[in-house]
Amino acid sequence: MNKLCTIVGAGPGLGAALGRRFEKAGYRIALIGRQLRQLENVANEISVQEGQVGVFVADAGNESELVTALGRTRTWGGDTDILIYNAAAMTEGLASTVSTAGLIADMAVNIGGAITAVRTVLPAMRARRRGTILFTGGGLALEPYPEWTSLAAGKAALRAYAIALHKEVALDNVHVAVVAICGLIEPGGLFDPDLLAEHYWRLHAAPATPRPRELVYLPTGADPFYNDQQAKYRATSRPIHATDMYEVAP
């Protein structure tokens, strides 16, 4: 049986591109998301090979639903070899107006689902002494934008969690990394989903020791103030800089 790549938060953009890239490399793909029809459309886009892609409905912010879905992926395709957490709750609101209840609800998806997924698949990875866990982060974790405070807080928490987990499990030969996408994902541009998916693959396949823990994806020509294009907060903002921990092709 082919190795299994499980994508939590598998939508038609980056999620579909990730599925295509890892399916191309010979992996079976398990797609987890909230909407069955959307998952089926993504599955049909990824592969025409019968049995190569499975769809499993769950809300990433609902712990019991996500655990159940991950259990079904294991029954279908075996233990997860690559986990990609790509789910996010995107609620607009200023820092001064965000509510405690709203922030907690968003955090259930932005960080809670990541923790649930990891706790479900990591024991088998540790036992086999191999596996990859990749998280979709964002530039908001590095330079928050007030109108998206909840998402920024979620991505910052996800980044901290990912780096802590990277340190913890490196000696178990499990590779953990987070990708901070510092721009808007659009086909055909610098942040084309297929181009991004290729970098996820490169992170997974990285041979270096220690392997990269973070990719700040800000290619040459991209706006380091992408989240403040009208310079509304320029006086109190800092430009985002790409990390030197992972070389990004221009």
Image (cartoon, helix red, strand yellow):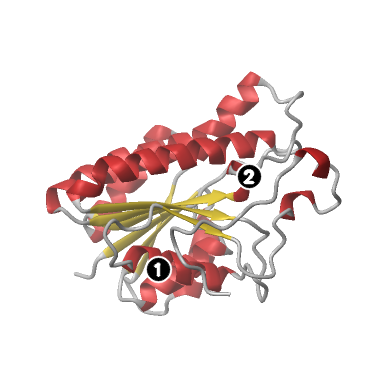
Residue 14, how many percent across, how many down? 55, 63
Q: Name the residue furthest top.
A: 100
Q: Is residue 125 above or below residue 47?
A: above
* Mark 1 and mark 2: Cα distance apart in space: 23 Å
**Viewer-closest of 247 and 156:** 247
Q: What residue is at 64 percent from the left and 70 percent from the top?
A: 220
**Viewer-closest of 209 and 12:** 209
Residue 12, how many percent across, how many down? 57, 63
Q: Which residue is mark 2?
A: 140
Q: Secondary structure at mark 2?
A: helix
The answer to whether any part of residue 66 appears in the image is no
**Viewer-closest of 226 and 241:** 241
Kind of residue sitting beneath label 1: Trp
Q: Quadrant of the N terminus?
A: bottom left
Kind of residue sitting beneath label 2: Leu
Residue 34, how many percent across, how many down? 52, 48
Q: Which residue is mark 1?
A: 201
